[in-house]
Amino acid sequence: MKGFNTIMKKYFSQKTCVISALLTIPSTALLCWMVMGVLYRRMPEYTELVTGYTTWTAYYKQGDMTLANLFIGGLLGFFLLYAVVLTLLSKKWSWLCGSFDRTGEYTAKQRESYAWFEDACFLVIFSQFTLAIFCRALIEEIFGMQPWLEKLFPIFQCITLIVVGIFLFFNHRCGKDPQKQEWAAHQRKSWVERMQWFLPIAFVLFRIFEYIRGGEVIELYRGRNMTVVSNVAFWLAIGYNGRLFHKCKENLRPTISIMSFLSLAVFASWTLPNGTISGTPLEMYHYGEIAEPLHELLNYGVVPYIDTMPIHGVCDYFQAAVGKLLFDGTYASIEPAMIVGCVLIAMATAAVFYYFIDNKLLGLLCVLLFSLFGDKYYYVRWAFALPFILIVFSKKMRKNFPMQLWSWTFISILSIAWNSSIGGACALATLPMILWECFHEKGWKIFFRLNEKEIRKKILPWYIPLLILGICFIPMFFAILRYIVENSAAILETTGDILKEELVSPYVWYATFGPGFSLLAALIFPADKEGGEKKLAWYALSFLIIFNLVIVRYTFVRTQFGERGIIATTICSLFLVLLIFLPSLEKRFSLWTAGMMACLFLATILTKGSNLLTMPAKVFERDTISDDYIYATVEETGIPGLGDIYITEAQKEELMNLNILVNDLCKDKKVVDMTNQLSHYNILNKENLMPFSSTYNTNNKVMQIRAIEVLEEKQPEILIVAPAWQHDSGSLSTRNYYMYQYIQKHYTPCRYKNIIFLTNDDEVRARFEPAYEEFGKLQHIEDLKMLPKAWGNEYLKEEETEPLNVEWSLLDTNATELGDDHYTLNAEENYFLYAFPKNQDGSEIPFLRITVRDESGSTESLKFQGVVYFMDEGKGVKEAHRFIFDGSEGSFLIPLTTSPYWSYSEQIQSMMLDFISGSLEGKQVSIETEFETQKPLEEQMK
């Protein structure tokens, strides 16, 4: 650290750093554009038979991660390069030395003016929310719903702003008179504190969820526990405010209560939950991720990370726990539980802002603007990120190393358990600061004074429970490491989105690459700084580098048009603004620091900040429930786990049929839901036997082998497969290839009404209709696009498959045969009809490999549409099933047994290959075909 400080102070001036940063941006962009232009033309290098959204186009997903690392490395490398070059040039050109900055000490008058401005801002903010509470709590509660009130509320807001503005104008005028200065300050204090008395009413207001149905206002999700908790919170807040304001009545400045922060956090983070449950597969999957883990823990004793792997971490238990504690715990309560869960997290974050950010105004603005900087579903995963950083980097903790080390260890344990990706990134990024303070700054010496009674009193009550917690966390930690290793085996090859297609707007560009601006600001800031300020700047730089290098493995996989990236960008910007730039500006003014702070803060507000003008009107928010939904009670559906709920008729029927099947007709049978609709376990009160929650999350060979082991051990008789959901454009047979191969060999399809399921039980087969055709429609993916090309690489040929001796012969073709599998293509559509000497059992022939080479010497790339038809005995091409793929020169692996039409047929008599393209006529090609089978999994795992 000392060496870096010396370099920055002696060699790199602020002008050098600023110019280097400006040159770094286009240089890094150009480097990324040049390198990625080459990389994105590559084929993905699959090492397993895996499928994700990117497989169908053979998108080079590894390139996204390369781009992220190249971007961060480019910023650091180019900045250092330009800084060194400009420093050398400064010996000739003296204008490169020195600083652009304008600095100065604050005068007493300036500090007084800022204090007045701060009080004025608090008064304006509190008055707006007090007005909203007054209108909603008093007028509507007394006189009932008044439609005109919501329409006129913006006018009331303007009137209130004018009144407050007039008061502040005269207050400021009075403050200039030395004789009236104290009176003016007392008036500001009085009104700011009076406003805060009304704010806790928010705790009571936002427990009510109102909707409009048929022109009438109805209330949903009423929970007795929610009512009790909100009432208790309100009276505690009132009592706390009374005690606090009485205690601080002699102060000239207004007292800002933590209850005001918590009340406004409720305003900022609350949104009206949906009054309906659509029951779409995507919703049933996402809500199931929230509801299912706690259901497993409470009903079957399934412990997270020990017995099962919650896909996102312990955070998956949180909102379901809110539903259990504050509502009725049914599936219907997931909607309000998600909202209230976000509110509770926002309140906890607001408390951290209050206690660890000295500037209360900026802290309150962050509470209002960024209390919900993510979707209600994704936000929970980031719950620990901002509080972690604010606490560990705070001035209070940095002055007390034992408490800083304790807080870092404690929050690291909680945040890693909460979400391993995000928590691990925060823990690793803050580790350099902890190590430096421990060893270089001799923080460890305090622990050698434990023989002193006072030191023991200060340290042991904190560290003994921490030691116990750490020991208990060890088994979970190793389970998390194991899961990370298993989950990352194929996730970076296929899973996620196509970043190139999403970079279509300035917002997505900023969300994706925004952390780079924070990184450049952190590189500029240390120049011309001294002592502890410079040390903090280097801590910030090391944090941003490590945090971004780690978190890109989370934000660059499933990018979702910047939805994850913008959260990381927001965190990086707020970190610099609140913990680095703000403390520096509080000591002395710096024009350059103020400019960087303003740019980052404004960019964050524009991209992820809430609308402060419309936020108070949330108290009037109501939603209309469409006539497409019906109100289904537990008495009507017979499903206690569903709850009383507005739902579509189709989804109601589907759930009732499913409930009859698994809880009545087959109530003694073990059930696994393979539709990815995890909510079924919670709704129907069934145990999830699978180790990775859903088939979608069982996305690579290692995980699927573990799933197969569970299937072999538990032998569930019922596997639900429909109503199905093609996740990432793939079916169960392609998304979970290894597991599906086991299933199709041991299970056969049956049907109960609109429910399709697989069974290995003869008794069940006898009671229900077979459903081969319906199952075939579900699993057969006709257009494989680029999947055969991606699976046709040499590595998979060597490691995953082996030749299968199957005889067949060419019966007919419209191409000219040249011998040795060489042909001249004579038409736009060229067919090759093959026949087997005897009918084949499809389940015994997993793959067909087609290798095409252009022998014509043409410079034009060979491109065509390939079609593989297969026909049972007595059927022609018109009755055949087929696979379509995007063809070119190379090897293509057709996964035949992903189609039930193939794998469940024992009468396959012929196949036809068809190559279609307007540019094929006259081409000379070699076409080699070979049947292959999958190597035994035991041999592969060796």
Image (tube, helix red, strand yellow):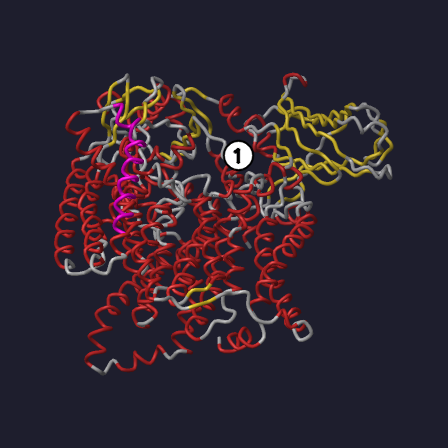
Task: Compare residues 895 and 638 and report the one nearer the observer.
Answer: 638
Q: Would residue 720 be found to the left or right of residue 506 on screen?
A: left
Which secondary structure class fits the magenta region best?
A: helix
Q: Amino acid at mark 1?
A: Ser
Q: Quadrant of residue 664?
A: top left
Task: Compare residues 195 and 304 and report the one nearer the observer.
Answer: 195
Residue 269: image location, x then y, percent: 32, 42
User: In the rendered image of this protein, does residue 344 appear above or below residue 27?
Assistant: above
Residue 281: image location, x then y, percent: 42, 30
Task: Compare residues 54 and 607 and report the one nearer the observer.
Answer: 607
Q: Quadrant of the C terminus?
A: bottom right
Task: Compare residues 270 and 337 and report the one nearer the observer.
Answer: 270
Q: Residue at x 37, y 46 (%)?
A: 369
Q: Residue at x 57, y 66 (%)?
A: 17
Part of the protein shown in magenta: 147-172
Q: Is residue 805 magenta?
A: no
Residue 358: image location, x then y, percent: 31, 61
Q: Which residue is mark 1?
A: 733
Per the image, label 1 sits on a secondary structure element best described as: helix
- Residue 668 seen in render: no
